[in-house]
Structures are given as structure tokens and as C-alpha cells.
Amino acid sequence: MTGSYLFRLLCLSMASFFLAHLALGAALSLMAPAAIRLSERLRPQLAARLLLLLRLAPTGLSLLMVAGLLAPSYLWLEPRATTEPIGWVCLAAAALGLAVWSLSITRALRAAGRSVRHIRHCQRSARKTYLRGETAPVWLMEDPAPLVMLAGVLRSRLVISRKVVSALSAEQLSAVLRHERAHSRSRDNFKRLLVLLAPGMLPFFRGFGRLERAWARVAEWAADDFAVAGDSRRSLTLAAALVRVARLGAVPSPPVLVTSLMAKGIDLSARVDRLLHFVPATAKPGGVAKLLSGGGVLLGACVITLMAQPVTLRAAHEFLEELIR
Amino acid sequence: MRFLKSTTVEQTRPSQPPLGHLETTVMDLLWERGESNVHDVVQRLHRPLAYTTVMTTLDRLYKKGLLDRRKPARAFLYSPRWSRMEWEQKRAGEFVAGFLAGPQPAGELLISCLVDAVGQQDEALLDELEKKIRLKRKELYQRRRP
């Protein structure tokens, strides 16, 4: 099959994205257990950042490779006048690349749609109000389920049912609201959208499940830590609030882009135990975070410098010539 | 859970026949040790049993579809067709399916019984967590007292 200049660029971009993403994804799947073990030794906030970064790394690096190296090398070195046949391997890889992207975009759009419908439902059936002692508004719902959730990807709203407000003490309610605001502050719903947008390794096989579950767990822990703010008494209050809300009954499963206090798949017992054995923070966070971010910036600078070299662009073009055959 | 043992079970008998005591013991042994012949099973049983009794039991398990067998030499080698987990899942699935296929009240009773059981377990867990919180609060209070 022969293709025009732009069609070949599109095929090569999709095919090289798919192959790079598959290789990086497979490597990440092998690394995932060790990364999860490492994250358990870090502060939850840092662990959440690390796990999210790893989860998004195959997509980010593959996109960087295609947009920053392969596409420029093609545009610079490929003669425009020629028509060249495209091999079946390249076409198949491009089709798979297109499929993984289509699936992930569809998944993210559907999740965003569900989230928007959920917010509209909340706005129709809830009343915007200020709870005593709180400066930010909440949406108060007359719902039989014990709801405490953060809805909205870019502009988040805190939704709470009257049942929860009546059941919790002022101190417990404050701890719960602080927990949800921590999710809002760290933009966890937006991060969920990014995770949904990041393609799977193969069509209908996402992989990365362990990493995503581990991230969701440490994101909850990080929000717990923010809510208790290093205070053992607040830690006990939040633990008591969690148990109290759990006693109020089952929570209907929220849409993917909505964060719920009683998050699905998060072990309540482990979470309460963690809060009970809370050690007040004394040292400033720093060492590992600084090392990781410094290392990341240095590596990024090296990669970008290397990518801009003519010799790298020529090598990339040779790779593209091999791929298209 | 008493009603599970009542006549409803008889009415909705699962397609997998129940196992006797010796059959269960032999299955446990094969799941633990893997492929074995009659002689191996006789040797590993905790009570002395005739070779022919064990042979008949293995043959019956083979006919019930629980075991595979092959004959590389003179004696048959038996191995479980399913892992223990798969077998338990199959049994539980057939048991529940049998109930749900039965008359309407039987299915509803089973579901309500399962919901109750899960709810009771949840309540017990929450009681336990609350107890831990109370103890921790007491400990914290005592530590803060001058």
C-alpha cells in the first residue's frame, strides 16, 4: 500500500507510539510490584505522586518520543515528493495505536459525561449551603444514602447528605470535610481523568491495574493525612467518623470521576488502623522528593538536548525507514 | 442458616453429586500431592484401607468427573480435573443457581440470608474498629494527663 507524505507521517506516528508504549508498558508492569513496595515506605503524598507519574510515564514518554523526535526527523529528512509503500507490520501497529487511543478517549469522554450528569442531578436535588464553622460551601442532599463526595473535574463541589451531617459530631464533620478538600486541593478527580485518558497497552487490555489501585489507596491516605494535619486527636476523630459513616449504610457506587469518602475497593479496616497508629509528623518532608524531582528535571533536560542533535534525528529517521517497510 | 439444610436443598439438588467422607479425604490428598496412583493414595491415608476400596473410590471420583486418569505403565495415575478453588467455586455456583432456579421464595430467602450474613460480618468489623478507637482514645487521654 502506498501513501502520501502526511498519511505516512500519521501511520508512522501511530505505529511508533503503539510500539514504544507497549514496550514501556510491559517494562512498567514488571517494575510495578517493586514501585508499590517503595511507595509504601514513602509519605502518602509523595507516594501518590510517584505512582501517578509511573502510571502516566509510558504515555508521556511515548508521546514525547513521537512528537519530539520521530515526527521532527520525518519532517526534516523525508523528501516530500516521493510516494513510498507502507508495510503491513507498520499498518497493523498504526491500526492498534489508533484503536488504543480511540478506546481511551471514548472511555474518558463517557466518564466525563457520567460525571456531568451526576453533578446536574446533585444540583437539582441538593441545596448549596454553608455548614457551621465552614467557609466553603457544600451541596446538601436529602438522600437516604450516606453520601460524602467530591464531584467535578475542574471545578469540584463537595456533596454531602443530610443523613451524614446529622450523624456526625461537629469535630467529625470538620475532619471529613477537610479530607474531601484535600482531594480537591490535589485535583484527584482531574488525575483520574488523566489516568482514563492514558491508553491501555493493547485494545481491550489496559494493564496497569495494580498501579492504579495502589495510587487510589495512597491518594486516600494522603487526603487522610492532610485532614488530620499531624494531630493524633484529629486522627482518632477521622477514624471514628469513617466508622460512623460506614454504619449509616451502603454507599451507591459513584461515577469514576467522583471521589467518595468511602471509596470503593479501599479497605476501611486498614485505613482506620493506619489512622490509629498515626505518628505525628516532626521532620519536614524533603529528601526523597527533592532527589526525585531534581533527578527528573536533569533527565528531562538531557533527553531534550539529545533529541535536538542532528545525529539523533538521523538515527530516528533510519528507524522510521525500517518501520515503514 | 438453618433453612439451608431443610427440604428446599433436596428439591433443588445441584448437578454435582455430593462427596462422601472417604472421597473428600482422597480429593484432599490428591490436591495436596498431585498426580498419584492407587498405591500412593493407600500409603498416604491416615487409616488402613484395602487397596480395592481405594481403587473403587478413585474410579468413582473419575466417573463423577472430578479426576482425570492416564495409564503410562501398568497402573492408572489419577489427578484432579479442577483445582480446589475451582471445585469450591463450581459447587457454590451450582448451589446458588439451584436455589435461584427454584420457587420464588427460595431464591429470595437465599439472597436475604446472604445479605444478612454479609451485614452481620460488617457490623462485627465496625464494632471491632470502634472498640479499637475507644481504646486508643483512652490511651491518648491517659498519656496527656499530667
Image: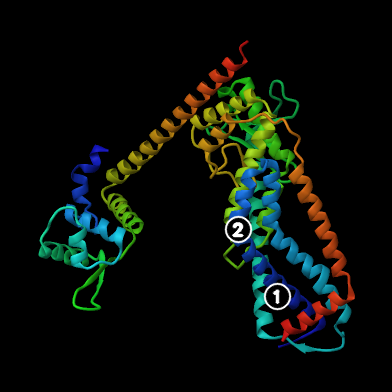
Q: Quick one: SS at disc 1?
A: helix
Q: Among all residues in the image, which is located at the extreme front? A: B43
Horizontally, residue A140 falls left or right of residue A296, namely left
Q: Nearer the viewer, mark 1 or mark 2?
A: 2
Query: How many marks overall?
Result: 2
Q: Is residue A198 visible?
A: yes
Residue holding disc 1: A15
Residue B29 drawn above or below residue A268: below
Q: Quadrant of the C terminus of chain A?
A: bottom right
Local packing at callout 1 (Cα closer than 10 Å; few below 14, some 14-19, many 20+) is many
Q: Is residue A256 visible?
A: no
Residue visible at 21% across and 46% down in the picture: B8
Q: Nearer the viewer, residue A316 or A324?
A: A316
Q: Amino acid at mark 2?
A: Phe
Q: In the rendering, at what x and y percent does residue A277 appear?
A: 58, 31
Instruction: Provide the chain ID for the residue under circle 1.
Output: A
- Label placed on residue A208: 2
Q: Position of residue A136 (x, y in %)?
A: 74, 29
Picture quarter containing residue A124?
Answer: top right
Asked which quadrant contains residue A241, the reply is: top right
Q: Quadrant of the N terminus of chain A?
A: bottom right
Residue A142 in the image, given as x and y percentages of width and height: 58, 30
- Cα distance between the residues tagged 1 and 2: 21 Å
Q: Relative to A41, is B17 on the left or the right? A: left
Query: Chain ID for label 2?
Result: A
Amino acid bearing label 1: Ala
Of the numbered discs 1 and 2, the one sitting upstream in the chain is 1
